[in-house]
Amino acid sequence: MQEGVLEYPIGGHKFAYSVQYKEHLLSQKTEFQQIDVYDTYCFGKLLTLDGHVQLSSLDEFAYHEALVHIPLLSLNNPKRALVVGGGDGGVLRELCRWNSLEQIEMVEIDKRVIEACRKALPELSNGAFDDPRVTVHIADAIQFLAEVKEPYDFIVMDITDAYEGEDDSLSQSLFSEKFHLDTKNALNETGFLVSQADNHVFCPYSLENLKKVMGKYFSQVSSFQALVPSFGGFSAYCLASKGAVLRQDWPGCKELDLKYLNRTTYELALQPLPFCVGSWNAPVS
């Protein structure tokens, strides 16, 4: 396919990027969503679902390393992990760096996302789908979580956003109170549940809503952030537990051979932002 220009929204539809691409590498309509992969000049390969950017090869490692390793670095010898969504394989790749993990499961509703990404973005999963510790379930996460028998040390929600003004989004039900009650029951007493929470500068409602619903079931709820240019500059994450808390000091992780996460970016991740949409006229203390 010939080159062109892709415009994609950041969160809702109040702000968008316009990106020139060299080639439209893949376009598939599935039972659940539209999958596209573009080769762009600025971001490298860019994956979109229903027109919303999910990752780019320029900075996906920043998003995935923060999502996975910031919580795991505060856990003691985790053994079992579950990924909800994440069909592109980036979260699996990062989880597979942890030798302590003995079981890594994924529940993904759309198998064609996995197939498309293994075809067009094989470097993203980097062989993680073939790791013997990994089991992939093609299933509805709502039913899957309701039937979990053995709890996990770590649950990662790498799902599409529930966008403002789009009540029929694929993952809308995964932000419900019933779903988070089931995640609480599926998490062990010392583990973490973490979810991506959109761009908290331009779409603060995503993080606010997650904190509110998680706070009804978990005793500890907090958030952190990462720098992700293709997401409009920032990505937020919401973290919940039955008592576990993040380390405030940099624990070090040389053995993981990471590209984004270091002492500086870890400390930045835990700092509150001084701005977001809706706070421009807030009084200065």
Image (tube, rainbow, N blue to C red):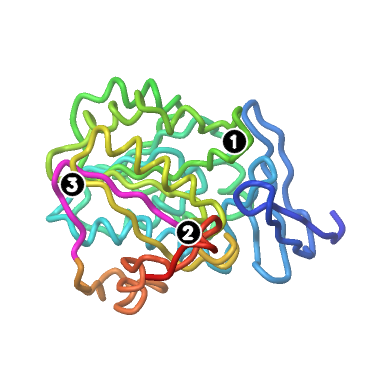
Residue found at x 35% / y 59%: 224
* Residue matched to label 3: 79
Q: Tag 2: residue type? A: Ser
Taking depth in this image into account, of 149 and 16 the one nearest to the observer is 16
| CB contact under 8 Å: marks 1 and 3 | no
| CB contact under 8 Å: marks 2 and 3 | no
Residue count near mark 2 (Cα–Cα under 10 Å), binned few <14, some 14–19, many ≥20: many
Query: How many numbered tags mark residues here?
Result: 3
Q: Quadrant of the C terminus?
A: bottom left
Classify 142 as above or below 222.
above
Q: Tag 1: residue type? A: Arg
The answer to which image quadrant residue 252 occupies is: bottom left
Residue count near mark 1 (Cα–Cα under 10 Å), binned few <14, some 14–19, many ≥20: many
* Residue matched to label 2: 235
Residue found at x 60% / y 49%: 11
Numbered label attached to residue 150: none
Taking depth in this image into account, of 77 and 216 the one nearest to the observer is 216
Q: Secondary structure at mark 2?
A: strand
Percent position of residue 272, x then y: 36, 65
86 horizontally vs 182: left or right: right
Alpha carbon separation for disc pair 1 and 3: 28 Å
Residue found at x 41% / y 74%: 259
3 horizontally vs 108: left or right: right
The answer to which image quadrant residue 264 occupies is: bottom left
Numbered label attached to residue 112: 1
| CB contact under 8 Å: marks 1 and 2 | no
Q: Is residue 241 magenta?
A: yes
Percent position of residue 103, x then y: 25, 42
| Span colored in magenta | 235-247
Percent position of residue 57, x then y: 58, 64
